[in-house]
Amino acid sequence: MTAILPAPVVLENDVVRLEPLTMEHIPDLFRAGGGDEEVWRWLPVPPPRTEQELAEIARGLLSDDRHVAFAVVQKSSGRAVGWTTYIDVPGFEMSVEIGWTWYGRAVWRTAVNTSCKLLLIDHAFDKLGYNRVMLKTDVLNERSQNAIKRIGGVHEGTLRRQRRRPDGTWRDTVYFGILEEEWPHHRARLNR
């Protein structure tokens, strides 16, 4: 690893609470997005059809020491509506990736994603001392690319045939970055 990943922590604002992901979140998470083809369309695993399948995916994520996983709890409902992670970025000093993120369709186009990114990026720069946050997505996932650009992500390039999708086709991966000195402007804009 090129940087030390953060210890699990609880981060919150008026919209969401990010708390360490546990198996206790699985029932809420399955209700939020289990089996939904569109929610899981761009993720590296097939859509979970049962709570047990979702639990297996979560166990795999939690056992991977390259990730620090958070359940995204919507404060208005008190329920987990998705998850997101910090990910190690080999080859980049003092950088961290935000990814492996999904939200149930009911919270799409709400303040949930922006609120999560504000918490995670603020924590990465202000508390943990990272100098760069990376985000990436499938070249075909225009909704995600637009969301990343909206929070201030700068397109840094595309890796062609970076990995296989669950259906066996090749995924080109679009990379975005936000530098520490760029973030205050974007934070202020997003908070307005």
Image (tube, grey):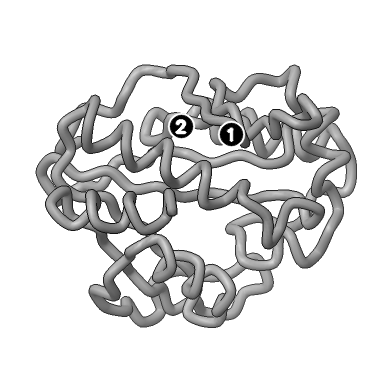
Secondary element under disc 2, as helix, strand or loop, is: loop
Which numbered dot is residue 98?
A: none
Secondary element under disc 1, as helix, strand or loop, is: helix
The image quadrant of residue 83 is top right
Q: Amino acid at mark 2?
A: Asp
Along the viewing direction, whichever of 123 and 175 lies nearer the viewer:
123
**In which quadrant of the rendered image does the N terminus lie?**
top left
The image quadrant of residue 128 is top left
- x then y, percent, for residue 93: 10, 44
Q: How many marks?
A: 2
In the image: residue 77, left or right of residue 169:
right
- x then y, percent, for residue 86: 39, 38
Determine the residue positioned at 85% across, 28% down: 27
Determine the residue positioned at 42% across, 34% down: 67
In the image: residue 40, left or right of residue 85:
right
In the image: residue 35, left or right of residue 115:
right
- x then y, percent, for residue 188: 32, 51
Residue that mark 2 sits on: 64
| Number of other residues with Cα within 10 Å of mark 1, as a class: few under 14, some 14 to 19, many 20 or more | few
Determine the residue positioned at 86% across, 53% down: 35
Contact check, label 1 and label 2, Cβ < 8 Å: yes
Please determine whether, in this image, residue 99 is positioned above or below residue 68: below
- x then y, percent, for residue 161: 41, 79
Distance from disc 1 to disc 2, alpha carbons, whole Å, reads 6 Å
Determine the residue positioned at 34% across, 42% down: 121
Please determine whether, in this image, residue 9 is positioned above or below residue 149: above
Q: Amino acid at mark 1?
A: Gly
Which numbered dot is residue 60?
A: 1
Please determine whether, in this image, residue 139 is positioned above or below residue 176: below
**In which quadrant of the rendered image does the C terminus lie?**
bottom left
